[in-house]
Image (tube, grey):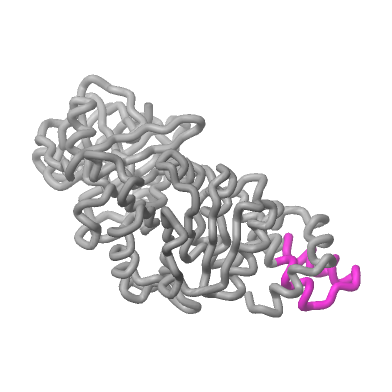
Amino acid sequence: MNRGDVELLFTPEAVDVLATLPPIESKANVVRNVSALRKRGLSAEMTSVVLLQQRLRTKASSKFGEFAGRMFFTEDGLQQSTRLPVAARHAARFRDAGAHHVADLGCGIGGDALALAGLGIRVTAIDRDEVTAAIAAYNLAPFDNADVVHGDAESTDLSPFDALWFDPARRNSTKRLSNPADWSPSLAWVFEVAERIPTGIKLSPAIDHAILPADAECQWIDDHGDTVECIVWTGSLARDGVRRSALVIGDGASHEIVSAEPDTEVPLGDIGTYIYDPCGAVLRAQVLGKFAREIGAHLVADQIAYLSNDSGAETPFAQRFRVREVLPLDQRAIAARLKELGIGTLEIKKRGVDIDPAQFRTKLKLSGTASATLILTRGPNGRVAILADRT
């Protein structure tokens, strides 16, 4: 999206047209709407702008719910934006730490700033991209405690702020940037600032642990089954004695495992009555050891993150499966057994084995009405196929 597109988008005509458009969920929707809007007399440029925006609004509903219908987006801004319920949790941490004026440095389309402003915190949102800053200004317009500045984070005077929020841009106009020194702002500068001012830093959940500050709280978050981010908290925003955290958010509830240090040691044992597939936050936060002790479980193979026990403890931190039987990892033997059991619907999971589940499924020639889960992995004595049921 360029400056001309934004100028068109901000016109009363575009706003009125957007208010009449249905959600756009497929290419067929786009084709029908192009024809309809052109018949209404819209220019080709206006048609393109409003349909792109409606497509982004439709996509954004999974992150912003009903708020998406009155917001504007860029494609990169939407992709990198924080899900609103998660952003609200971050904003609550700022509030609880007593932050009064927060700078959102690299604000994108303003999702995190929106959550901060919604809790009554004064927020100054700053982005170096002119188009993105304009979009953020529109999205934050309902809040008189929010300001948007078109400027560079690393050139900003930070003295007016008592806390900071960063979501460094990890893409340029053409590609994803793998080197943190190329991010905007650069991660080295962000970490240096965070040593002086209470700060929250949103990073990819796959961030290299080696570059994370040793004295900060690092929190990985799962939201409704997706591992969405790692947050580095410093100063008064970090909790005493917490260096690793796995937070799981579900429908109306959240659960957390915290640790003063990485805790990954788990004993080995046999495949028991239940198998657990830990969520990404537990694995990335390096708290698998603490989690395993909490449910009384052990690994079934070294370096493979499937846990097992006989107790069947319920937990929000893993998918749980009840084991039916353990088979040799032999395609023909598995196919014969599944046919005997009448299993025609099969979920295939794998870890620690070089197998393409889609190709493996084709070779099984499934038929029948029963369903099950097949876990392809390594056990205490080599490769196995665990036939199980979700519980």
What percent of the width, then of the height, locates residue 360? Answer: 33, 51
Please state if 248 lies on the left or on the right of 259 as rendered.
right
Please state if 85 lies on the left or on the right of 355 as rendered.
right
> Measured along the vertical axis of the image, is residue 290 above or below residue 363?
above
Please state, as top left, top right, bottom left or bottom right, where the N terminus lies in the image: bottom right
Residue shown at 60%/60% (left/top)? Answer: 147
Residue shown at 66%/53% (left/top)? Answer: 144
> Measured along the vertical axis of the image, is residue 118 above or below residue 14?
above
Image quadrant of residue 254? top left
Residue shown at 54%/62% (left/top)? Answer: 125
> Measured along the vertical axis of the image, is residue 238 above or below residue 183?
above
Q: Which secondary structure class fits the magenta region best? A: helix
Q: Is residue 305 visible?
A: yes
> Measured along the vertical axis of the image, is residue 210 above or below residue 362?
below
Image quadrant of residue 161? bottom left
State how many labels appear: 0
Q: Nearer the viewer, residue 367 or 79?
A: 79
Q: Nearer the viewer, residue 367 or 300?
A: 300
Farthest residue, direction right: 40
Q: Nearer the viewer, residue 4 or 201?
A: 201
Q: Is residue 339 visible?
A: no
Residue shown at 36%/58% (left/top)? Answer: 204
Q: Which residues are magenta?
A: 29-51
Image quadrant of residue 150? bottom right
Q: Nearer the viewer, residue 350 or 22?
A: 22
What percent of the width, then of the height, locates residue 108? Answer: 53, 64
Task: Confirm whether the magenta stretch covers residue 39.
Answer: yes
What percent of the width, then of the height, locates residue 100? Answer: 49, 48
